[in-house]
Amino acid sequence: MAQLEEVSYEQYKHLVSERALTGETMLLNMGPQHPSTHGVLRLLLELDGETIVNAIPDIGYLHTGIEKNMEAKTYLKAEVMTDRLDYMNTTGNNLAYCMAVEKLVDLDVPERAQVIRVIITELQRIASHLVFMGAFGLDLAAMSMFLYCFREREYIMDILEMCSGQRMMTTYFRPGGVWRDVPVEFDSAVRNFIKIFPARVDEYEALLTKNPILLDRLVGIGILDGKTALSHGVTGPTLRASGVNWDLRKARPYIGYEQYDFNVPVRAEGDTFARYIVHIEEFRESLKIVEQGLEKLKKLPNQPVISANRRFVPPPRAEIGVSMEALIHHFKYWTEGFPAPKNSIYNAVESPRGELGVYLEGDGGPKPHRVHMRTPSFDNLSVINKITQGHLVADLVAILASIDIVLGDIDR
Amino acid sequence: MDKKLEKIVQALQENFGTSYEEFRDEAHVFVKAENIVEALTLLRDKFEFELLSALTATDYYPQETPRFHVVYQLTSLARNLSVQLRVAVNSDQPKVPSAAFVYDTANWREREVFDMFGIVFDGHPDPRRILTPEGMEDHPLRKDFPLGYEEPQFTFNYDDVDLKKIYAKE
């Protein structure tokens, strides 16, 4: 039988208070196998009774060496790895990576592809927030939320499957555009979702927003002020719930976000409830963008969805059958890849969790010299010790759920 | 380059004698290792770069001097600007002063760079590994660290592979 090992004080001496030495406070492990840690996160808690004195996260249980693996693959094949980072926001990761490659090699993207990218990214944002909402409800004992949210998420998963053939690991966006045009049934499927979803968001609000039990557990818990948040590199909804109006879609518009009319929800309180409300409001804003995207898509029928710059884009399937050069190009493109300049760029997009940045460095050859993914959950989690101090263990679960971490995003 | 950014790059040049490169509208400013904490403090306090977006490194092995570049990507929310600082370090003693007291986020990011590249950050408050297990001695993102793999175990090579497993050596 496995022996329970005591957590040694020596190793964490510089992180916990002196009271831990005398045994006045208790050191306790939470996780890595714990349902409310959203994956395999280990938290070392220093407890005074049931009050948290320190919460020290221990990460790396899901480390898969994605950055190292990407260095050994061509620019195209490396994209497949990005899906596995933040598995709730797969197309968003593809987008960040593709935009980085496009910036590095200076590649254009046709307008129709941009619009498709916006629609898919915003749908994925809704899907990611739905998982947040479900898990958040589940952690606060509102069991049915999880079922409702996953029911709605299925609509989006179906749309992604319709476009790319995959529910989650899509790799739908490619450097220069998207893999292929959206199918004919795409429009009606998205419109159906737009019709159903607003009423469902109202349902969630009816269940949670004014629920007195929930309010008792959320209001005034885990307060994070804007300055601490920025110093800790916290971005995304968590930052916006702390009163800082910073959204990369507005501040530095990419893929044509400047043409869409939407608001950025900001709350000043910085507590767990504010973070929840920001997520709820982002449902509605994302839906607005999707609706406008569909209108734009209608105005651009039969237009290319991938760049015509054949240096970085494969030849169309129809050409391969009749053109010798296209066949040679196809073969060389998929085996050798394309070269990129010996320089580095940094490109950031707004993922559902915050600033998802890609640092990409080429070495003149077909493989990246260095890829670094600046993942938002990593920095968002680093603030957990500051905002949980003085709260109860049960509040820690609520706070952890509200900052919306994904362990695949943290550990890479 | 952006006019507003030009001023900042000039200020860095005057104070620390930095050089800079430009690529795709991005400014990469090269700072000496001993100046990095002051440079970051200057950018944070005087030029409102509140957010340290990314802190990473890259390895140029087999090139030895400088072998590593430590990269600091800074964002200013108030001015909507970005600037990148780069610190070149040699391989014999990869040491950089820690920025953990300037930006809190540098605490974990520097632990990650230490873990992956073995670059020591002087004065770091919590110099432990972060992603790889305790007791690991290598630094996986260095270019001289091989990208290894495990041989798949099939029926025809079951015993051969079994002998190489860690538990076979005990």
Image (cartoon, coloured by chain):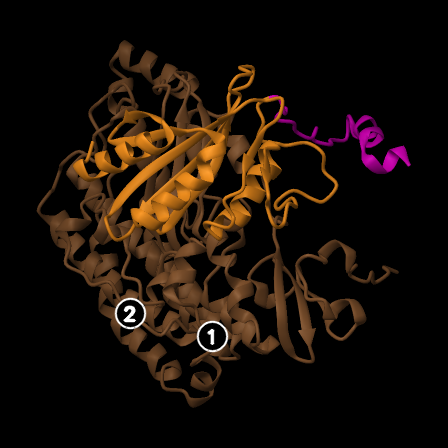
Chain colours: A brown, B orange
Q: Earlier in the sequence, mark 1 or mark 2?
A: 1
Label 2 marks a residue whose chain is A
Q: Residue at x 44, y 75 (%)?
A: A145
Which amino acid does the dot numbered 1 rest on? Answer: Gly
Q: In this view, does A134 lie above or below A232?
A: below
Any part of residue A376 in sight: yes
Instruction: Pinpoint residue A271: horizontal percent, then vertical percent.
Output: 41, 74
Q: Which mark is residue A42?
A: none
Label 1 marks a residue whose chain is A
Q: In this view, does A412 lie above or below A133?
A: above
Furthest residue toward top:
A324
Q: Which of A128 and B139 is in front in this view?
A: B139
Tags 1 and 2 touching, CB below 8 Å: no
Which amino acid does the dot numbered 2 rest on? Answer: Glu
Furthest residue toward left:
A299
Label 2 secondary element: helix
Q: Do labels 1 and 2 share a chain?
A: yes
Seen in the image, is A154 located left or right of residue B148?
left
List the residue tagged with mark 2. Answer: A281
| Quarter location, residue A130 | bottom left
The stretch of residues the image draws in magenta is: B144-170
List the residue tagged with mark 1. Answer: A137
Instruction: Pinpoint residue A31: horizontal percent, then vertical percent.
Output: 66, 62
